[in-house]
Amino acid sequence: MTTNDLLGKILLLFIGLAVFAAVVGLLIFFIDKAPKRGRDYWQLAGFLLPALILIAIGLVYPAIRTFILSFQTNDGAFTFDNFVWAFTQPAAIRTLINTLVWVLLVPTLATAIGLAYAVFIDRSRGEKYYKSLLFMPMAISFVGAGIIWRFVYEYRSPGRDQIGLLNAIVVAFGGEPVQWLQSDPINTILLIVVMIWIQTGFAMVVLSAAIKGIPTEQLEAAELDGTSAWQRFTNVTLPGIRPSLVVVLTTISIATLKVFDIVRTMTGGNFNTSVVANEMYTQAFRASEVGRGSALAIILLIFVLPIVVYNVRVLRRQREIR
Amino acid sequence: MSIAPADLPAPKEVGGDDVVTAMTLGETKTGRVKKRLTSRTATIASLIIAVLWTIPTFGLFISSFRPAELIRETGWWTVFSNWGWTLDNYNEVLFSASQSSPQLGSYIVNSIAISILGVLIPLVFASMAAYAFAWIKFKWSNALFIFIFALQIVPIQVALVPLLQFFSTFLRPSMEWLHDVIPIIPTQNYVPLWIAHTMFGLPLAIFLLHNFIADIPADVIEAARVDGATHGQIFFRIVLPLAVPAIASFAIFQFLWVWNDLLVALIFSGGTQDAAPLTQRLAEMVGSRGQDWQRLTAGAFVSLVIPLIVFFSLQRYFVRGLLAGSTKG
């Protein structure tokens, strides 16, 4: 990087900041000095339109366009081939199955471990530090996490010192080292472990807060009735945190469906580890198969749709109460 | 990261120590004994989980300070029998100017520049929109808000192809013009990344900030209005200062998201030193030099340091945002 490059970048950043400040300044000026007639509408527009326009260009229009693209060949003719391809080609089917495995394993395991941990450390000494340890991976990029775990799964031919922790453990117990990331189907499971590693902290923090929200009277009453710790957990704690459990499960499910970076960094989608989000990128931006990529994006959207509908219903109910 | 609504009692403070002490004091003696017995296995189990969760990062951290030959030939856990420490790895990934080295310096600049406006723009526009949704009555307000909430959950993958086409038609010419006027600004610059991150961040931002801004007591807003304050004044003098905690928590979310993003960068940055962020460079290194562990470990750690610092120093706000999103709706 030369000094000129750096200067150019800093200059651009300042131009960007200045332009943005000017836009916001103008907007506010416009809001306060709006013409008397229809003032409310002008003001509303000033507050709302910037966000709405950006959302319309960045999300709504593209989503509609992707939907259309998914039914087109590269020449623009109407076709169902992209979807037929996605559900018939062995490689594409494998991608769908992998995604299914991801979305079954990650939310359940991350939530289960997070919940167990939250219950175990509840009201213990040093709870804050315990939490930080599990929570830390959330700040790490998926790419960083990919490198961290590639190092754990690293392979050295038998006889040499293993530098990957997993193979070192295998060898220490008298096994043969394995090329983990290249052995199907264990490699998909090992990638899933990375995602669980990242998401457990999220589950733990939300569930821990929910557990603290359960009235102590309920737990004490159950204790007086002579219930065991396990009974108290299943009959008092679990029902008490049900809404949070749903939130955690759905949030992690969505994150899992969209997972891209982990697969990209660790295997690049090779060795039968690809998932829909990664295959979508590969098809649309590497193989120039825009139709197929769009079809995969739409399939992803359809996977997410039930969760969206469910959440919207919850939100609407809450807004009626408000 | 997307966030879903749910109704559950919002705790006052996560891990509040006062609550803890109050409870232990209130417990009877037998109760306390019981608690200890059950918690021994619990303590061991949680210790095991905590260790399992920390070891991978710890191994990377140790390795990044070991000489290349030692990383290649021995496990990091044998560091005591294979003693050797060095800062060369960091020196090489950050400062070496040779063509073959990662030259992370310029990518750090990119990541920082992308993050600054990639957080600021959605923050400002979203708080304005959130204010409108909360305090300006209009037709379809509810339906529109729910629609935006739903967009938050929609995978951004559905937006990528058309948005790229859109940018190359409309944004590309102005970027070239800027390059012609000021030659030191590269044609492939941050502008598409700023705009893309803004667009993708807005729905979550509006949702999070709205929850908070709508909870400001109506009396406060009404009083200001009676005194003749305009919407602009109310927004700047009353709403923004009161919403600082919510703004802080969204800022952390968005910062972590922008800093750690790979997908948006891959598609909109052009992939060169001119605009690509750290994550993209690291992913590239894994692809081309997946065995250069001395570089990968140091590089990965460089990329982790800033988000980890932000995260740990502002953890309180982050957790609050997480819970505000998932507890109030």
Image (cartoon, coloured by chain):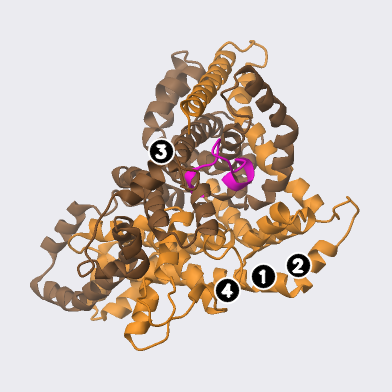
Res. B246 mark: 3
The residue under label 3 is which amino acid type? Ala
**Of A225 and B141, which appears nearest the observer?**
B141
- Is A251 located above or below residue B102 in the figure? below
The residue under label 4 is which amino acid type? Val
Mark earlier in primary sequence (2, 1):
2
Name which quarter of the figure residue B274 lies in. Answer: top right
Dot 4, crowdedness within 10 Å: few (<14), some or many (≥20)?
some
**Of A136 and A307, which appears nearest the observer?**
A136
Mark earlier in primary sequence (4, 1):
1
Dot 3, crowdedness within 10 Å: few (<14), some or many (≥20)?
many
Colour chosen for chain A: orange
Discs 3, 1 touching: Cβ within 8 Å: no
Secondary structure of the residue carrying numbered label 3: helix
Q: Residue at 58% across / 41% down in the picture?
A: B272
Name which quarter of the figure residue A150 lies in. Answer: bottom left
Q: Chain of mark 4?
A: A
Q: Which residue is mark 4?
A: A101
Name which quarter of the figure residue B296 lies in. Answer: bottom left
**Of A247 and A284, which appears nearest the observer?**
A284
What are the residue bounds of the magenta stretch?
A: B265-279
Report the mark closest to the observer, 2 or 3.
2
User: Would residue B272 be counted in the magenta stretch?
Assistant: yes
Q: Which residue is mark 2?
A: A86
- Is A24 located above or below residue B129 in the figure? above
Secondary structure of the residue carrying numbered label 4: helix
Task: State how far apart marks 2 and 1 are (Cα).
Answer: 8 Å
Left or right relative to B215: residue A226:
left
Q: Chain of mark 1?
A: A
Task: State how far apart marks 3 and 4 are (Cα).
Answer: 36 Å
Say if labels 3 and 1 share a chain. Answer: no
- Is A171 located above or below residue A103 in the figure? below
